[in-house]
Amino acid sequence: MRMRQLLVKTLREAPAEAELTSHRLLLRAGLVVPLAAGLYCFTPLGWRVVRNIERIIREEMNASGALEVHLPALHPIELWEQSGRAALMGQTLFRLTDRKEREFALGPTHEEVISYLASRTIQSYRDLPVTLYQIQTKFRDEPRPRGGLIRLREFTMKDAYSFDTGWDTLDASYDAAFAAYQRIFRRAGVPVVPVAADSGAIGGKDSQEFVFLTDSGEDTILLCPGCGYAANAEKAEFVPPPPVPGEPAPAERVHTPGKRTIAEVAAFLGVEPRQTLKAVFYRADGKPVFVAIRGDLEVNEVKLKNALGARDVEPMDDATVRELGLVAGSASPAGISGMPIVADTSAVEAVNLVGGANEPDYHLRNLNHGRDWQATLVAEIALARAGDACRACGSPLETRRGIEMGHVFKLGTLYAEKMGVYYLDESGERRPCVMGCYGIGVERMLAAIIEANHDADGIAWPWEVAPFDAHVVSIGAGESVVAEALRQVESSLAAHGLEALVDDRDDSPGIKFKDADLLGMPARVTVSPRSLERGGVELRFRRGGESAVLSAAEAAAAIGKARAEALGAGPA
């Protein structure tokens, strides 16, 4: 393929708004062109990489026994109302109405539609187990698209769904998908760490994310160096520092002029932050909620939402706080009425805490749950942080940033019962299928591949996903001897089953070499009068090593050998 034909337009500098390395290189290499927030056009070069990623995914999903299907992206809204997720997804769900005033949604995911398909094709236990997958466009009205291809409003996902007769066979389907994911990410050149995760709006029982650890990631991951425990911040479990022991003492009202924060109150009264009671105000599905947690801890809003069974949880605005008569900086659950009180276990288990007196500049000493205040709901809603003790082994947890690459769920019968996915067992009894769900974001994979495979000069593609195997730089193409050598190079590469991108532009050698490094094909072959004087063409691999002057046939053979060694056994 000639660069003139491929419409490759490189940039010396990326736009200022591109913050992530992958975003900058995607734009500089001309792989994508932004259309609007969260929307990108893929150029021919970028689309070749996407297709290579999809090929790897297909090969590994097929090898795992999964069957490919194709489902509509346009969904009747009734399916989403039947599952209960039309309201749960809220504004994230793109809605539209056709000319007959029927309401539809653009699919953000496909649990509802795959369940519809399964309900009309699965009849007996003999049809199970089965895993169906597709590679399909998804639509989500993200409030803050970011990071180039990391968070989009229109994106491609490989989503797979398993259907089993019970939890034991679901475990086998889940493990097969898990193993396929490990192979997919290995072949794509992205090192990942499986971490425990929250199931979010999809729901279900067990859930794990495959995370690429990088400082540019949007997710916080808690890792235990002692036992290997790993979870994202939304899910991570930990052991908080123990409370200060003691016997319940009488409550005492104290004057705390101008002291509003936990740190200020603790210092003023000579106590530790863990001896204080923090009040945090939220709205859960529009209704006020009072949250009580020990002063040295923070609220995990995802755990809070799950504990309440709410669709949405957000901090209460100042106007609502004043309207409800809450005293910010001096509030406590003692004497509060008219709203539920959710308490973290830390606040219930501690004794003699310092909390607000619900009047400005006053606090109460020795607040104790059950005597001075009563929680409506007690749950573990604290956020794990670096240094907290691992629940499994007690070692201090460490935090890293990461990008979620894939997610696997054990859905159980949640959707089967709502959407009517049943089968007849050996006794003829009607039972719901036990389901699993497995997703990979294709564009996210592309971004992570670049984040994991680049240097100061540009992208360094892994062999499996590279748009071309070799980048051929032609210098002095007008000379007959160079033209003939170029023909030999192209013929030799093709004979070894290798694809080449030939830079035939009328640009300087310096520009061509810089673009070759930026575009990042695994091998570079230079055909020039100088190389021919030295006995052949110059071969250099993108990931380092010395340049060598070889014949066209020898260069092609060396590239083929390097590619074969890098790919190893290939698909499982």
Image (spheres, rainbow, N blue to C red):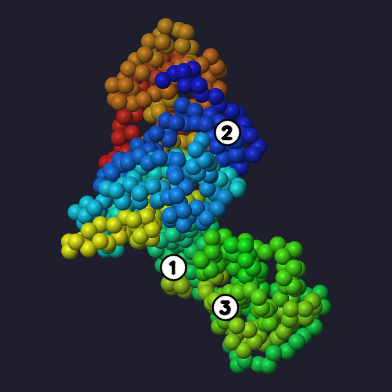
Tell me if mark 2 has few (under 14), some (14-19) or many (20+) residues whose alpha carbon lies within 10 angstroms of its own: few
Q: Residue at x 43, y 72 (%)?
A: 392
Q: Which comes sooner in the sequence, label 3 or label 1?
A: 1
Q: Say which amino acid is labelled 2.
A: Pro
Q: Secondary structure at mark 1?
A: loop
Q: Say which amino acid is labelled 3.
A: Thr
How many angstroms separate mark 1 from mark 2 (CA)? 44 Å
Residue 495 placement (x, y as % from top left): 28, 21
Is residue 428 found left or right of 10 in the rendered image?
Answer: left
Q: Residue at x 48, y 12 (%)?
A: 476
**Residue position marked by numbered label 3 in the rendering:** 376
How many angstroms separate mark 3 from mark 1 (CA)? 37 Å
Q: Say which amino acid is labelled 1.
A: Gly
Q: Quadrant of residue 325?
A: bottom right
How many angstroms separate mark 2 from mark 3 (CA)? 49 Å
**Residue position marked by numbered label 2 in the rendering:** 34
Q: Which comes sooner in the sequence, label 1 or label 2?
A: 2
Q: Residue furthest left?
A: 426
Could you tell me which quadrant the N terminus lies in? top left
Residue 333 placement (x, y as % from top left): 66, 79
Q: Secondary structure at mark 3?
A: loop
Does residue 371 sit above or below 308 in this rendering? Answer: below
**Residue position marked by numbered label 1 in the rendering:** 226
Q: Residue furthest front?
A: 100
Q: Which mark is residue 519?
A: none
Residue 195 placement (x, y as % from top left): 43, 59
Q: Quadrant of residue 20?
A: top right
Residue 451 placement (x, y as % from top left): 50, 43
Q: Nearer the viewer, residue 479 or 103?
A: 103
